[in-house]
Amino acid sequence: MRRLRAQLLTISSFIFLSACSVFGDVSVKVAPYSVIATDGAFEIRQYERLLLASTYTPDGMDGVSAPFRKLFGYISGKNDKTEKIAMTAPVFMDQVGQTTEAMSFVLPAGLSLATAPTPLDPAVKLTEISDYRVAVISFSGSLNQDSISTHRTLLQNWIAGRGLKITGAAKAAGYNPPFTLPFLRRNEIVISVGKT
């Protein structure tokens, strides 16, 4: 819980550096997607392509801000082209196994695996996801372990109620800095689903 809270604060601080506001406006670009279906706070969403820069915190490592620092370093110029890369919202977070936390920054839509600068840190990996269909629940308030768990369960139940098949692990997605008024924050839980 303490680790997740610190990690979310670090992520939110970065988004602050990317020019978000106290009133919930996200000034950075948001990864493009199409809405397939909407049901209140729930959506079925299609991302045609996402290019992610991702890294992990190995089991037993205590530094919760390590993934953030690695990814921030990459987009700040620690790459083979010494290029700065614009931030795109959201920041995705997930867990691999029991304790290994993963974090991903979405890279701008104009970049591809062929054109994106290569990370100098071998712990930062670039991956491209195509034809990514997800179920999403959006919510405001704090993005903490309790809200993630509650909304993940709500989303899983909604998916089951629609007869959809879950095809991947849940991810939390954050869009706003910590000083954004809680009721104006945009948070999401995202779960990949099969096409019907």
Image: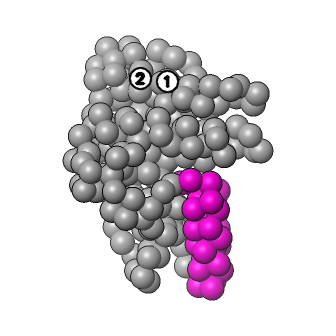
Q: Which mark is residue 164?
A: none
Residue marked by disc 2: 74
Q: Is residue 29 above or below residue 163?
A: above
Q: Residues within 10 Å of mark 2 (few under 14, many from 20)?
A: many
Magenta stretch: includes residue 82? no
Disc 1 crowd rating (10 Å Cα; few below 14, some 14-19, many 20+) is many
| Residue 44 as seen in the image, left or right of residue 116 | right
Point out the image quarter for the C terminus.
bottom right
Q: Is residue 160 magenta?
A: yes
Give the Cα separation between the discs numbered 1 and 2: 6 Å
Residue 128 in sight in this render: no
> Between 80 and 188, which is closer to the camera in this rendering?
188
Can residue 155 be seen here? The reply is yes
The local secondary structure at tag 2 comes to helix
Query: Closer to the camera, 163 or 10?
Result: 10
Mark 1–mark 2 CB contact (< 8 Å)? yes
Amino acid type, mark 1: Lys
Q: Is 76 positioned to the left or the right of 172 in the image?
A: left
Residue 113: % across, % down: 41, 33
Locate residue 28: give its quadrant.
top left
**What residue would you read off at disc 1?**
70
Residue 193 appears in which quarter of the rendering? bottom right
The magenta span reads 144-172
Q: Position of residue 186 (x, y in %)?
A: 38, 60
Q: Residue 115 placed where, x, y %?
A: 33, 29
